Structures are given as C-alpha cells and as structure tokens.
Image (spheres, helix red, strand yellow):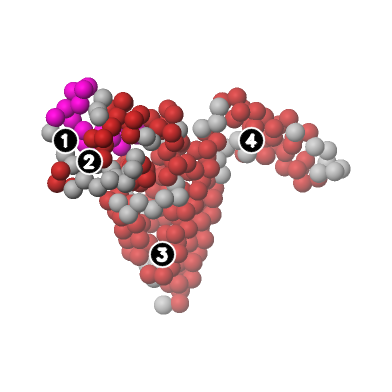
C-alpha cells in the first residue's frame, strides 16, 4: 500500500464485493490475520488482500492508508482478543498473572502476526484500553504512579517478548522444532560429569524443562518481585 488518505466519512463501502460481502475494517483485519498466518509478512499487500476479499485492491484505501497502518490494526486486534477473554477478580496478582498468560496464549494462537507486531505501539482503541486497565490494577493495588508505570512496562514487555520468542519457535517447521528439542537429550544429557559437572547434575531437568516455554516461571518471578516491592512501599507508609 502507498500512503493515501480517504476522509473517514467516505470510508464505508456501500456495495458488496464480488464475493457478496460488505467491506469493513474488522473484515479486512480478520482477513489479514488469516493471510499472515498462511503466508507470512508478504500477505500484507493490497493485491493479495483484495483477491482474498473479492474486492478491488484500491477499495482498501478507504480503511487503511498503507500496509503499516493495517499492521497496527492487526496488532491492536490481537490485544483486543486478549482483553475480551479476561475478567478481573480484584486480586491484582491473580489478575495480572491471568492476563499475562492470556497475552502469551494469544500470541501463540497467531504466531506469525505476533512476531510481526509485538514491538509496535499502535495508539489504537484496544491498546489504550489495555494500558488504562493494567495501570488501574496496579494503582488500585497501592503502587505509586511511578512504580505502577515501571511494573506495567516490565510486565507488558515481558509478555510481548516471550510471545514473540515462543511464536517464532512455533512458526518453525515441525521437523526443525523436534530436532531442536532433541538436542537437550541427544547432546546435553550425554555430557560427562568430569568436564561439565553442572550440566550433568541437572541434565534430567534440562531435558524435561527446556522444551517448554519459561514464560509462566518468568511471569511468576516478575510478579513476586512486584509484590515484594509493594510490601516494601506500603511498609514505609
């Protein structure tokens, strides 16, 4: 896509496409997500999207100015999907743990899109809602504003980073994933104790643990540190 601008009032298409559907931002984003998972980043072209939608490619400019604008909408939709499934309980630790795990699971459900968008700032509706929600959880728990922002920053970056990391692994061909997982048993578990005592001592744990994502453990460590920090802050007041 090139950088064109269509006034917002003129964006809605009134006639159905060749496939009998009426274009909308939601439909275009959903189609882009599907194509990204099937074809990768190259799916974000007006020609491929237009073909998938049965629409003239130029009609997409009524909704998105260029491909980066569409990518930001895709990233925001991933955030929205997570928020729509999350229900706070009032227990800030449990709520953030649940939200983090849902963010990670959402990335793994759309691995190619997650890798493309994890590092972007959308400034869109769902991202704004997520920032407001997480900061609200932290401030209501008792974190001062500066500390709430620090914990928010670490929490979100950790979830996005692990989501992108694990999504990249998930996107590998199965044979490659299986081969990498087998290295822990075929190589590390066979290293002798006289040359690699620490690996040898922990080999069975490495074989069992390293094939799994470390995100739940990392999330628990982060939240434990945040809880300790909050207790320290509240103890001073």
Q: Residues within 10 Å of mark 1 (few under 14, many from 20)?
A: some
Q: Residues within 10 Å of mark 4 (few under 14, many from 20)?
A: few
Q: Which residues are magenta?
A: 15-34
Label number found at residue 208: 4
| Comes first in the chain, label 4 or label 1 | 1
| Comes first in the chain, label 4 or label 2 | 2
Q: Give the Cα distance between marks 1 and 3.
A: 41 Å
Determine whether label 1 and label 2 are within 8 Å by CB. yes
The picture quadrant where one finds residue 73 is: top left
| Observer able to see residue 78 | no
Residue linked to disc 2 = 62
Q: Residues within 10 Å of mark 3 (few under 14, many from 20)?
A: some
Residue in the image at 45% along x and 77% along y: 236
User: In the figure, is residue 38 to the left or right of 46?
Assistant: right
The picture quadrant where one finds residue 175 is: top right
- Identify the element where label 3 is drawn: helix
Q: Give the Cα distance between marks 4 and 1.
A: 54 Å
Q: Give the Cα distance between marks 3 and 2.
A: 36 Å
Q: Give the Cα distance between marks 4 and 2.
A: 51 Å
């Amino acid at each position: 896509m090139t950088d064109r601008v269509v006034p917002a009032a003129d964006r809605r298409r009134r006639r159905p496409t060749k496939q009998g559907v009426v274009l909308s931002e939601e439909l275009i984003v959903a189609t882009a997500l599907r194509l990204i998972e099937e074809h990768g980043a190259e799916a974000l072209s007006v020609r491929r999207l237009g073909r998938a939608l049965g629409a003239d490619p130029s009609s997409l400019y009524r909704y998105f100015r260029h491909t980066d604008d569409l990518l930001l909408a895709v990233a925001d939709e991933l955030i929205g999907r997570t928020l729509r499934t999350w229900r706070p309980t009032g227990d800030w630790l449990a709520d953030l743990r649940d939200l983090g795990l849902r963010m990670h699971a959402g990335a793994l459900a759309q691995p190619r899109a997650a890798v493309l968008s994890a590092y972007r700032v959308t400034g869109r509706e769902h991202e704004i809602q997520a920032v407001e929600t997480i900061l609200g959880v932290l401030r209501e728990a008792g974190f001062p504003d500066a500390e709430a922002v620090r914990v928010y920053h670490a929490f979100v970056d950790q979830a996005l980073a692990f989501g992108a990391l694990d999504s990249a692994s998930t996107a590998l061909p199965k044979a490659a994933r299986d081969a990498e997982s087998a290295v822990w048993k075929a190589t590390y578990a066979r290293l002798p104790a006289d040359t690699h005592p620490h690996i040898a001592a922990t080999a069975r744990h490495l074989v069992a643990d390293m094939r799994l994502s470390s995100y739940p453990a990392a999330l628990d460590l982060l939240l434990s540190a945040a809880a300790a920090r909050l207790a320290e802050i509240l103890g001073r007041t």
